[in-house]
Image: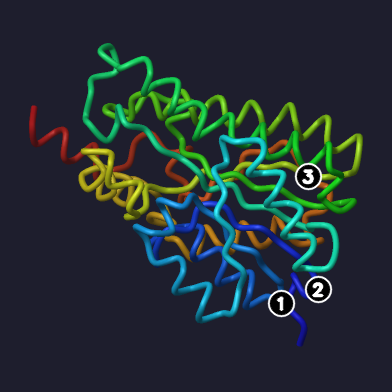
């Protein structure tokens, strides 16, 4: 039986190693019949194990700095040449904050790092979509998904400038989704994922505590990397061809839960 992505061609940005959300998305896309090109920066390819996935699955791995227009142009050209046509879907899983990695308090953020955070984690989506539109690289009715987190709209202690970047990312998805949808019927959506133990997530000093807290609070528990991959595949597929400019929450209900009986009992014990 053919998978829901059979015959579709995709580009996966941001897989680093087997813990990466993008890695899980790539594996799920392949299982559903898609053809892929993997991409990350030269440094990430050297530091991570994405080359192992590319070799094992016989996938092209193209170095691309998603903050550089010329790199993105070259990537789309090579991907279309290798895959034999326009791209049907793109995953944006690109994020980095040196302020977060160095545990700088938000009010003492280094501004050069701050600008870098926004460029890598948010403006890169704008650049990817802008280049794709100019090159007409994404097929009619194609789908673009970017990964985000609930800190884009709520205060999370210690998440710092990455929260601002995620808010910007989601705004770009809405605006570019409206423009690209009218121009080529291309959908642009966000998947807001539970805290997940990835290399990137480990930069947040409170991640281990918050992983347990979110799992405790969420009615369904934390969504894991495979859950995230399933949502992305659905958005890439024709099953959701009229869904665009949305933020889909893959978080076990955490984002819509404030208080549980367990939390009430815990608080009562402390007071």
Quote the CA–CA distance across marks 1 and 3: 20 Å
Q: Residue at x 72, y 41 (%)?
A: 188
Q: Residues within 10 Å of mark 1 (few under 14, many from 20)?
A: some
Give how far across and how far down residue 154 sits, in percent.
Answer: 43, 25
Of 38 and 43, nearer the camera is 43
Furthest residue toward left: 270
Of 252 and 69, nearer the camera is 69
Disc nearest the viewer among 2 and 3: 2
Q: Are marks 2 and 3 in contact (CB under 8 Å)?
A: no
Return the disc, 1 or 3, that comes first in the chain's sequence. Answer: 1
Q: Residue at x 36, y 47 (%)?
A: 200
Give how far across and how far down residue 49 sits, in percent.
Answer: 39, 67
Q: Residue at x 65, y 48 (%)?
A: 145
Q: Count the marks: how many?
A: 3
Give how far across and how far down residue 40 sits, in percent.
Answer: 51, 53
In what element is the residue under mark 3?
strand
Circle 3 residue:
187
In what element is the residue under mark 2?
loop
Dot label at residue 15: none
Quote the CA–CA distance across marks 2 and 3: 18 Å
- In the rendered image, the quadrant that contains the N terminus is bottom right
Give how far across and how far down residue 147 sits, in percent.
Answer: 54, 45
Dot label at residue 7: 2
Q: Are marks 1 and 2 in contact (CB under 8 Å)?
A: yes
- Residue 151: image quadrant is top left
Q: Is residue 168 above or below residue 134?
A: above
- In the rendered image, the quadrant that contains the C terminus is top left
Circle 1 residue:
33
In what element is the residue under mark 1?
loop
């Amino acid at each position: 039986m053919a998978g829901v992505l059979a015959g579709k061609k995709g580009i996966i940005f941001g897989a680093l190693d087997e813990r990466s959300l993008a890695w899980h998305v790539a594996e799920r896309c392949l299982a559903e019949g898609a053809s892929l090109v993997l991409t990350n920066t030269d440094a990430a390819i050297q530091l991570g194990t994405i080359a192992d996935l590319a070799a094992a699955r016989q996938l092209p791995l193209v170095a691309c700095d998603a903050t550089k227009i010329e790199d993105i142009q070259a990537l789309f050209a090579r991907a279309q040449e290798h895959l034999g046509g326009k791209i049907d879907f793109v995953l944006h899983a690109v994020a980095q904050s040196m302020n977060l990695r160095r545990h700088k308090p938000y009010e003492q953020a280094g501004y050069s790092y701050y600008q870098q955070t926004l460029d890598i984690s948010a403006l890169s989506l704008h650049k990817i979509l802008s280049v794709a539109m100019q090159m007409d690289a994404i097929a009619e009715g194609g789908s673009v998904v970017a990964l985000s987190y609930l800190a884009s709209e709520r205060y999370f202690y210690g998440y710092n400038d990455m929260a601002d970047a995620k808010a910007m990312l989601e705004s770009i998805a809405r605006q570019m989704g409206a423009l690209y949808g009218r121009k080529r019927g291309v959908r642009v959506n966000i998947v807001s994922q539970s805290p997940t133990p990835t290399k990137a997530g480990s930069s947040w000093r409170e991640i281990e505590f918050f992983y347990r807290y979110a799992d405790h609070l969420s009615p369904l528990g934390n969504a894991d990397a495979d859950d995230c991959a399933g949502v992305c595949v659905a958005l890439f597929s024709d099953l959701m061809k009229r869904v665009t400019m949305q933020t889909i929450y893959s978080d076990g209900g955490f984002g819509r839960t404030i208080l549980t009986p367990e939390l009430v009992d815990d608080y009562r014990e402390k007071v």
